[in-house]
């Protein structure tokens, strides 16, 4: 068993996979910036199922896998902390306040989101045609086909759906407000980087300086304040059932703190937007690069519809689509690492490896997702891999289809959502949103790569261990003949 401070066995540092001596450490850091994936793979191959230390983002991080990952997951929050790591990265205490940094007010809010997922789905379903058609209307149409940047379209659609689910109509369709949110998000990101450059004790005062770099959460505050006043004027039981109402119910008081509300909203929007949009972007690129899958998924969607509609239950029946998205995440996982922790006390693993207080620990992810010990032909994109794995267990005598290979299920071999007590609490929402959008697109549009791509999936962009979908590559959409009902719906929405 690991021991937090003492151990009878010989204690030692994790092995370094790059030189860390005086002078050469800098070279190791430059190598890790340019060659993160390669360095991580090298560490994994040298220490399979083990522990090693590698340079990352200006520090040295202990990387774990195998049984050591389980030891990290079992450690109490007071020893290996996820929230403290997040606070340090995002500077939540200075930029939003203790309700966020200490009380984690966003967590109960996401629980409410999960409890209301059927209602939230209804909002997403209503907003989807509007969001997609608006994005497509920005580009010219040739012979019925509209060519758009895939990732930009995915990002904007997810942003629009999140705003609808979190804030409701009409604010979610206010383009000025959307611009303000994007500005606030960028100012926030920049501020976190600047604050981290100051010693801890000076950050509070550093944050007070008026800034040329923008003040986080200011741009969207004015419209939000108006919406809050309007929401408060409605009797509590009649308020729309969405995030803004839930935040207000958790912050009782005469004068709501608009800065805090904006901060909470921004953090939830931030964690839900980027990862979800990247996941959708990757999956759409796999879809157009594997066009033979489109008809198969479309047939499954048709078979799952309820009264012609994509409902929550019908989404749960779309096992091939689910497998397709999970395989897309396995193959082009968003990050090569998972599970962020910082040691608040010295921590000693069962083999005597010691991590000192203040140091960071992360779990290896991508090399596991591409390891032939866990996945057959790991470098091949097999859209029905998880569908087949679930069905193979039924064939082997299990009475019903297992859900352990479902998109939302984390495991030691599928670390996209993290694992253990901090496993992503937004994964049901994210999966529902991505599946709904893809099902809607596949049902109502033909989708393809431009001829110039020659059938090849556009290359991903790898930055500091993050695998981004290609930013400039385009895909084409053409409305399908039988989607007349959708056109009427869209025209109706604009008229109203
Ligand atoms: C495809 C989309 C998403 C991916 C891949 C993803 C992935 C992750 C990962 C890897 C973690 C960290 C786990 C750890 O370090 O132990 C995490 C945590 C978290 N995620 Fe997500 N996430 C996604 C979408 C969302 C959405 C939509 C929401 C909110 C609605 C959300 C809210 C959170 C929160 C609040 C945490 C922190 C949990 C805690 O404090 O215990 N995520 N997510």
Image: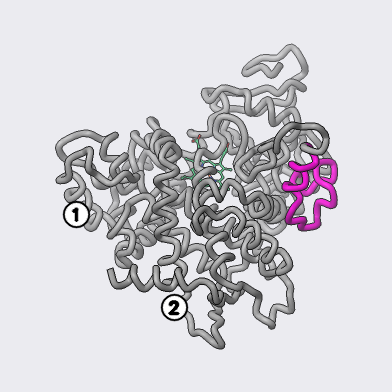
Q: Is residue 181 left or right of residue 358?
A: left
**Left or right, 307 with reference to 394:** left
Indicate the quadrant containing the N terminus: top left, top right, bottom left or bottom right.
top right
* Of callouts 1 and 2, the N-terminal one: 2
Disc ID at residue 465: none
Foreground residue, 67 or 248?
Answer: 248
Q: Residue at x 68, y 50 (%)?
A: 323
Q: Secondary structure at mark 2?
A: loop
Whether residue 158 appears in magenta in the rendering, the answer is no
Residue 170 sits in which quadrant?
bottom left
Q: Residue at x 55, y 55 (%)?
A: 305
Magenta extent: 368-393
**Picture layout, residue 396 above or below residue 270:** above
Answer whether residue 62 is visible to the viewer in this image: no
At which x and y percent is residue 439? 56, 59
Q: Which quadrant of the rendered structure holds the C terminus? A: bottom left
Q: Disc 2 designates what residue?
A: 138
The Cα–Cα distance between marks 1 and 2, rounded to whole angstroms, is 29 Å
**Foreground residue, 471 or 283?**
283
Per the rendering, the mark at residue 226 is 1
Looking at the image, the residue that sits furthest to the bottom is: 143
Q: How many dots with numbers?
A: 2
Q: Nearer the viewer, residue 401 or 184?
A: 401
Callout 2 environment at 10 Å: few (<14), some (14 to 19), or many (20+)? few
- Residue visible at 40% across and 58% down in the picture: 126
**Residue 205 pos. (x, y %):** 31, 43
| Residue 162 left/right relative to 148 | left
Q: Quadrant of residue 443?
A: bottom right
């Amino acid at each position: 068993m690991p021991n937090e401070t003492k151990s009878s066995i010989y204690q030692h540092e994790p092995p370094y996979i790059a030189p860390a001596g005086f002078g050469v450490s800098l070279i190791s850091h430059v190598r890790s910036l340019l060659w993160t994936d390669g360095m991580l793979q090298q560490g994994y191959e040298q220490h399979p199922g083990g522990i090693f230390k590698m340079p990352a983002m200006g520090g040295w991080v202990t990387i774990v896998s195998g049984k050591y990952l389980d030891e990290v997951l079992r450690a109490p929050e007071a020893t290996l902390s996820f929230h403290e790591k997040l606070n340090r990265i995002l500077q939540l205490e200075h930029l939003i306040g203790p309700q966020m940094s200490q009380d984690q007010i966003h967590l109960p809010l996401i629980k409410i989101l999960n409890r209301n997922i059927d209602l939230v789905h209804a909002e997403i379903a209503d907003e989807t045609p509007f969001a997609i058609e608006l994005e497509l209307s920005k580009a010219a149409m040739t012979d019925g086909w509209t060519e758009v940047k895939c990732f930009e379209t995915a990002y904007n659609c997810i942003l629009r759906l999140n705003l609808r689910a979190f804030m409701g109509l009409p604010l979610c369709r206010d383009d000025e407000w959307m611009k303000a949110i994007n500005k606030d998000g960028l100012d926030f990101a920049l501020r976190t980087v600047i604050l981290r450059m100051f010693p801890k004790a000076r950050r509070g005062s550093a944050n007070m300086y008026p800034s040329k770099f923008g003040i986080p959460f200011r741009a969207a505050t004015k419209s939000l304040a108006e919406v809050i006043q309007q929401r408060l004027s409605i009797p509590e039981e009649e308020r729309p059932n969405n995030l803004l109402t839930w935040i207000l119910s958790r912050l009782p008081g005469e004068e709501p703190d608009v800065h805090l509300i904006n901060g909470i909203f921004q953090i939830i929007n931030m964690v839900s937007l980027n990862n979800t949009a990247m996941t959708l972007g990757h999956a759409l690129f796999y879809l157009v690069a594997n066009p033979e899958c489109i008809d198969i998924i479309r047939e499954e969607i048709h078979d799952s519809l309820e009264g012609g509609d994509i409902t929550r239950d019908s989404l749960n029946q779309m096992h091939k689509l689910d497998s397709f998205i999970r395989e897309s995440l396995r193959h082009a996982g968003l990050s090569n690492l998972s599970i962020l922790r910082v040691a608040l006390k010295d921590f000693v693993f069962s083999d005597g490896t010691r991590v000192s207080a203040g140091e960071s620990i992360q779990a290896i992810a991508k090399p596991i997702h591409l390891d032939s010990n866990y996945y057959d032909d790991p470098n091949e994109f097999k859209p029905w891999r998880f569908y087949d794995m679930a069905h193979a267990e039924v064939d082997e005598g299990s009475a019903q289809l297992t859900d352990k290979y479902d998109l939302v299920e984390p495991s030691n071999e599928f670390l996209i959502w993290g694992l253990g007590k901090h496993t992503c609490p937004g994964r049901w929402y994210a999966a529902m949103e991505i599946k709904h959008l893809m099902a809607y697109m596949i049902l109502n549009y033909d989708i393809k790569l431009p001829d110039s791509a020659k059938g090849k999936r556009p290359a991903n962009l790898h930055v500091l261990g993050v695998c981004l979908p290609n930013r400039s590559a385009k895909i084409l959409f053409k409305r399908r003949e039988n989607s007349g009902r959708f056109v009427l719906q869209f025209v109706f929405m604009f008229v109203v």
